[in-house]
Image (cartoon, grey):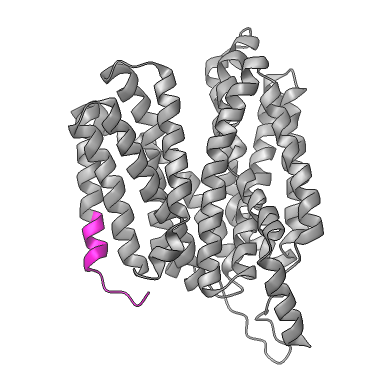
Amino acid sequence: MQTQDSSLQDKKTDSIIFKTALFSIAATTVLGSTLIAPSLPALEKHFSDVQNIDFLSKLILTLPALFIMIFSPISGFMLERFGRLKLIYPSLVVWSVMGTSGFFLDNIYLLLISRAIFGIATAFLMTGVSVLLSDYYTGIKREKALSLQGFFMAFGGAVFLMMGGYLSNIDWRYPFLAYLLGIAIMILAIFVLFEPVRHSIEKKDTHIKENFDFVKFVPVYLLGVFCMAMFYVAPTQLPSFIINTLQMNGSKVGISMAVASVSMAIFSLFYNRLRSYLSIFKIYFLALFLIGSSFMAVGIFHNYPMTLVAFVLMGAGLGFMMVNNSSWLFKLAKDTEKAKAYGFLAASLFMGQFISPIITQPVVNSFGLIKMFCIFGGLMYVIALLFLVLKSKH
């Protein structure tokens, strides 16, 4: 009977509607800033009478990331304690309500509070959906599912960026209404997702309680911080390169960012095939080599076509690396550690976003923008070579 139930669950998790519900939740986690980014100039103009609005308007984008970084580890412990869906469904409601509130609020400080709570809800969704994926799938199925998750998140980011731009042309408030998608996703999820059966370590016949082994995950977290810090060179430094060095307009920046997102989405889909031929460490080598090559292309060839090629390489490298990080983490984690472990990984990714300009701007100030790309490109090559020579059982 247990085998039959397991077979039915496997069949359910392989269905298109099941994966659509699961990965749609994953896609919500990239809506934090991409959806409303095009509205910022109009929002700033609307609140022009507010002191320091130029700074406060930027917080509309960055505040959720700060709270995601803080609450992701907490969400991991709570998801382990109370279960997955019991926290994911309320988080979707809070995510939608707080996201949509921007359409109605006419006070910048209330809007900032709503964005902070929105970030907390996103932390629970990001950790929860990734851990659900590792609960539902194992082995090669997990590799495929991680690839699909990467695709949904990257492609969703590109789609929502374009959607936000279109809606912001109507009115700066309209993009906030798109967060109502969370309610529709939750309704679909309620009908098709199920709380996975987990094998708890707390047995009745033993008083031994295992502690969370943070140290063994540190290499994964450090790579998460580093790769995200390097990827965020794109939105923090490349716009200046395109506009000031290449003398092109802002629309070319938007096209370049979309190219990177689409590239990341497409190459994420190939991860499971790549994993059947290469070890986890060899994939890190490939990913770092691609990102390093993208930096070198920008630093050596000062033209827009090569910049687009660089964005393709960067998206491909990050697509492989993000999926590889999750794959390595879930291989290291015991069943009772997965939620906690991924919570810290999510925090490390947003820490990478936060420290990216802190790392790169001093190099730009000392050596110039062009040399900065070459310096970090060379650093990527060095780290890539380390992974090439490291021997691993993975």
Residue at 56 percent across and 26 percent down: it is 37
State which quadrant residue 113 falls in: top right
Q: Is residue 37 above or below residue 292?
A: above
Can the viewer see residue 340?
yes
Residue that protrudes farthest toward the front in the picture: 16
What residue is drawn where x is 42% and y is 36%? 259
Q: Give x and y (percent) for residue 248.
A: 34, 17
Question: Seen from this angle, which residue lies furthest top?
Answer: 49
Instruction: Provide residue 73's location: percent of width, then percent of height.
Output: 58, 56
Determine which quarter of the picture holds residue 365.
top left
x and y percentages locating residue 118 in the rendered image = 68, 39
Quarter the C terminus occupies: bottom left
Q: Is residue 171 visible?
A: no
Q: Residue at x 37, y 25 (%)?
A: 239
Q: Is residue 353 above or below residue 318?
A: above
Give the side of residue 52 with respect to residue 256, left or right: right
Q: Residue at x 69, y 63 (%)?
A: 15
The stretch of residues the image draws in magenta is: 383-394
Furthest toward the bottom, the residue is: 205
Residue 384, magenta (yes or no): yes
Q: Quadrant of residue 57?
A: top right
Relative to the observer, which residue lies in front, 315 or 206? 315
Tell me: residue 115, above or below residue 105: below
Q: How many marks?
A: 0
Q: Is 346 left, or right, of 102 in this rendering?
A: left
Q: Is residue 246 above or below residue 314?
A: above
- Location of the N terminus by quadrant is bottom right
Could you tell whether 240 is left or right of 9 in the image? left
